[in-house]
Image: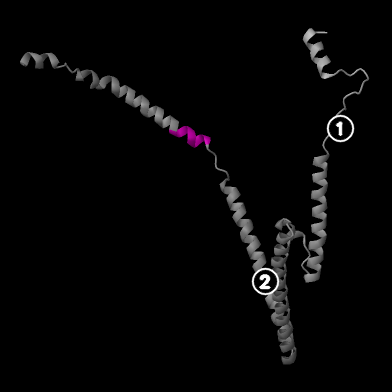
Amino acid sequence: MQDKNKVMRWPLEIQLFGDETDNSEDDSNQQDNVDQQQDKPKAETKPAFSQQDIDDAVTKAVKEAKDQWDAQQKEKQSEAQKLAKMSKEERGEYETQKKEKELADREAELSKRELMSTAKESLIDKGLPIELAAALDYKDADACNKSINAIGKVFEDAVQKAVEDRIKGGKPMKKASTNATELTDEELIYKNMMGK
């Protein structure tokens, strides 16, 4: 049995795999290659915006916001000065008019939203695209209905014309000639078979 164990043993040449003199040079070369590869992508990628571009954009946005705020403050100051010059009755009347105007604006916006909603429903019911709602007149219900009908008619006419153009097609095909020398089927078959 020992002879069998001796025969089955295979000599391991571990020293070939563990030789460090050759591998240390390869490892340092591989490390250099990895460093160079890491440097290349960094050099190749350029930022989309430079710091100057970002600074300019931020400065512009801040300036616009400040200008808008200044305009609002000036408006408030001028209104305060108007109110200071007015008597008590005039101030009350002015405030009432201002509130009525705000209320009318809100009401107009609300009615416009309601008209848009009903207009979209009407467009869907008529089988028209909802995108046509942007072209409608929302002054009042009558104007909205008139514009829906007008746009619907124009849209349907355009679709009908496009369908007719597609159906029309190209030039008509030529008709077969009607000669007096037309052959019957039997004569045609005979002629083709005989090669005449």
Between disc 2 and disc 1, whose residue precedes? 2
The numbered disc on residue 63 is none
Q: 121 above or below 169?
A: below
Residue toward you, 32 or 172: 172
Is residue 121 or residue 95 the one in the foreground?
A: 121
Write the residue at 82% across / 57% down.
153
In what element is the residue under mark 2?
Answer: helix
185 left or right of 47?
Answer: right
Task: Residue 78: give x, y in percent of width and height.
Answer: 72, 78
**Residue topped by disc 2:** 72
Q: How many marks?
A: 2
- Farthest residue, direction front: 186
Q: Which residues are magenta?
A: 38-44
Are there few (<14), some (14-19), or many (20+) residues within 10 Å of tag 1? few
Q: How is the image coloured?
A: one colour
Q: Amino acid at mark 1?
A: Pro
Neighbourhood count class around disc 2 (C-alpha, 10 Å): few under 14, some 14–19, many 20 upward? few
Q: Which residue is located at x 82 percent, y 65 percent?
A: 146
User: What is the chief secondary structure element of the magenta stretch?
Assistant: helix
Q: Indicate whether residue 68 is drawn in magenta.
A: no
The quarter of the picture where residue 193 lies is top right
Q: Position of residue 160 (x, y in %)?
A: 81, 49
Q: Which residue is mark 1?
A: 172
Single out the mark in the foreground, 2 or 1: 1
